[in-house]
Amino acid sequence: MSYLEPSEFVTKMVDAGESKIFMSAKDTLIRAFMAGAMLALAAIFAITVAMKTGSPLLGAVLFPVGFIMLYLMKFDLLTGVFTLVPLALLDKRPGVDVKQVLRNWGLVFLGNLGGALMVAFAMAFILTYGFDTDGGAIAAKVGHIGEARTLGYKSHGIGGWFTIFFRGMMCNWMVSMGVVGAMISTSATGKMLAMWMPIMLFFFMGFEHSIVNMFLFPFSMIMGGDFTLADYLIWNELPTVLGNIVGGFVLVGLPLYYTHVKTSPQRNA
């Protein structure tokens, strides 16, 4: 594993953020679409493994495969750009402003949503043989997840809303460590190992990831989950996105930037 020093890979993080801002709309949307689709496939794969083996841990151990594939292909997740793109603004890179940051976030959001919805529809079609059957145990399981993680939170009122927010924050703390992990090594093996652990942790702990949820909840609704689009947006997606922003930028991007790029002078003894 060819390890890079933090001062090197944090500079790469800022460079990556700047590069994403100036990427064309076409490339940004395509890369985000593919990332959303691949992560959605990884999610349904991990749920299937957990159900068929009876081991949630095994599902969590295998889920990072999807994340690793999409990052090695340099596709973009919203949770990753939450961490990287603002660093280019903070570093005062030429031409980077708040409008450009929001433009990037908006395009990646749309791309991720499109990819996740495509897989949600395709998986629903596959499991029901073209909506001719009820979809079986896997569809029922995901339907239950959708209800529990919308109406379940809603039943706790404002405490439930902030529970989602903190779950989203903890999630992207770990996911962004996976994004950083892809930069701390120059070898493919080193990158994969560094990404694996934090992604496995977030999935096993049941934290809330805005892109995974773009698949789970629409899929659940297609399969008859008993909750509304408003329930999903208010009692899951919105607080999850906000929590993901805080977890990725405040808990990962900022600490690394201010301790390895904008370092303070050494103090005298």
Image (cartoon, rainbow, N blue to C red):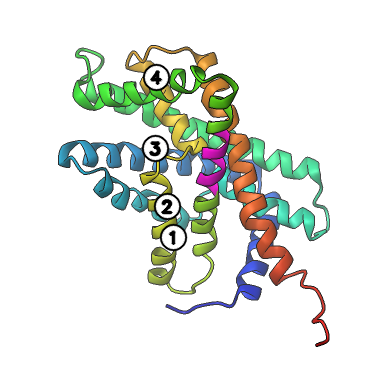
Tell me the amino acid under the disc marked 3.
Ala
* Residue 207, x across and y down, in percent: 45, 40
Q: Is residue 175 visible?
A: yes
- Secondary structure character of the magenta stretch overall: helix
Q: Report which quarter residue 51 is drawn in.
A: top left
SS label for mark 1? helix
Are the residues tagged 2 and 4 within 8 Å (C-beta)? Answer: no
Give the Cα separation between the discs numbered 2 and 4.
24 Å
How dense is the environment of label 3, judged by Cα within 10 Å: few (below 14), some, or many (20 and up)? many
Give the Cα separation between the discs numbered 1 and 4.
30 Å
Q: Residue at x 54, y 66 (%)?
A: 183
Tell me the amino acid under the disc marked 1.
Met
Question: Which residue lies under the disc numbered 1?
Answer: 195
Question: Which residue lies under the disc numbered 4?
Answer: 147
* Residue 157, x across and y down, in percent: 56, 19
Are the residues tagged 1 and 2 within 8 Å (C-beta)? Answer: yes
Check the image and name the residue furthest to the left: 53
Q: Residue at x 73, y 70 (%)?
A: 261
* Residue 180, x across and y down, in percent: 55, 61
Q: Earlier in the sequence, mark 2 or mark 4?
A: 4
Give the Cα separation between the discs numbered 3 and 1.
18 Å
Tell me the amino acid under the disc marked 2.
Ile
SS label for mark 4? helix
Q: Relative to residue 64, is residue 9 drawn left or right?
A: right
Q: Relative to residue 85, is residue 110 drawn left or right?
A: left
Q: In the rendered view, tell whether residue 93 sits above or below residue 143.
A: below
Q: Is residue 174 within the magenta segment?
A: no
Are the residues tagged 3 and 1 within 8 Å (C-beta)? Answer: no
Q: Which numbered dot is residue 40?
A: 3
How dense is the environment of label 2, judged by Cα within 10 Å: few (below 14), some, or many (20 and up)? many
Q: Which numbered dot is residue 199?
A: 2
